[in-house]
Image: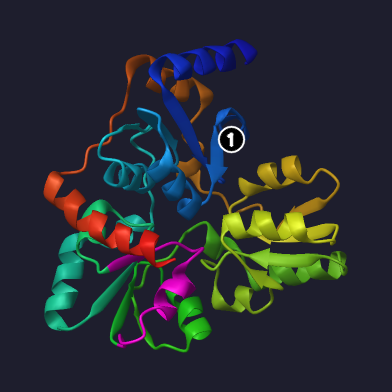
Amino acid sequence: MEKLKERIIKLKEERDAVILAHNYQLAEVQDIADFVGDSLGLSRKAAKTQAKVIVFCGVLFMAETAAIICPDKMVLTPEPAAGCPMADMITAEALRKKKKRDPGLFVVCYINSGAEVKAESDICCTSANAVKIVQSLNDVNHILFVPDQYLGHYVGKQTGKELILWPGYCPAHVRILPQDILRLKKQYPASRTIVHPECRPEVIELADEVQSTGGTCRSVRQSQTEDFIIGTEIGIIHRLRRENPEKRFLPASEQAICPNMKLITLEKVLWSLEKMQYPVKVPEETARKAGGALDKMLTTV
């Protein structure tokens, strides 16, 4: 394992590369990364990096986003088969049909979507800034939120806006059930519950806080609480324990696993750097339109 890490570090320097990893990645991948974060943090890091090559350890839409934001960089995904089931629940064609049937829709697109869907949207958001993005739309009322109905429901409640919700969802987060939270709360009465806004509304109602993965890390770091019930994909537990060894973290459900996030391994990261595989390419016109929606997000909040 150590020799593998050494080879990755050496190749990274030779290629002038930076490794970005999402909080849900395998522990070994998080540990080798230059930056670990949520979608918003990774987007900002990609936009600011001076490296020539970005090795993106996450699902495909994340690597696409980096390629759009950084057209002068080479963006590599170690595993092109690492897709996102939620992103697959909406297509650009279906969105175009919806807009045609309902003229005047303003489309807020969760970053968990493909580049072609982003290109049909007015502005993007992440779970970290979705509430602020929608709050900023002072003169817009006819809003379609795609593709996550649960994040959209949460945003609607927080902003008081009536959003039209696309019927998409995250298969990992919907596995977290209210009884999971209630059982752990009973077992650890002094604990604090933090859940992701992709969770079901009835789970969100039981939480002390609703946070993106980046927000969860910050909140835990600042809290004096010792025990935390964490309602999101279990990959984040590794980072939380590494950064807060004196605290205890209880996954709300051991079933909250994204198999696609676990497809990337150290061996695949090494292969990616050795062979410069697999480059992520977004068609120029799609990248231009999607880039507009992403730029609006990055400059709004």
Query: What residue sits right under mark 1 in the picture?
Result: 30
In the figure, is residue 104 to the left or right of 267? left
Residue 125 shown in magenta? yes
Q: In the rendered view, tell whether residue 158 sits above or below residue 40.
A: below
On the rendered structure, is 65 left or right of 38?
left
Residue 293 relative to residue 97: left or right: right
Magenta-drawn segment: 123-141
> Depth check: 109 or 219 in front?
219
Quadrant for the C terminus, please. bottom left
User: Which image quadrant for residue 80?
Assistant: top left
Q: Position of residue 213 (x, y in %)?
A: 58, 56
Q: Quadrant of the N terminus?
A: top right
Q: Position of residue 225 (x, y in %)?
A: 84, 62
Which amino acid is tagged 1? Gln
Label 1 Cα neighbours within 10 Å, binned few <14 / some 14-19 / many ≥20: many
Asked if residue 12 is positioned above or below residue 178 in the image, the reply reads above
Residue 94, by quadrant, is bottom left
Above or below residue 236? Residue 17 is: above
Is residue 118 a member of the stretch shown in magenta? Answer: no
* Res. 64 image quadrant: top left
Q: In the picture provided, is 287 more to the left or to the right than 124? A: left
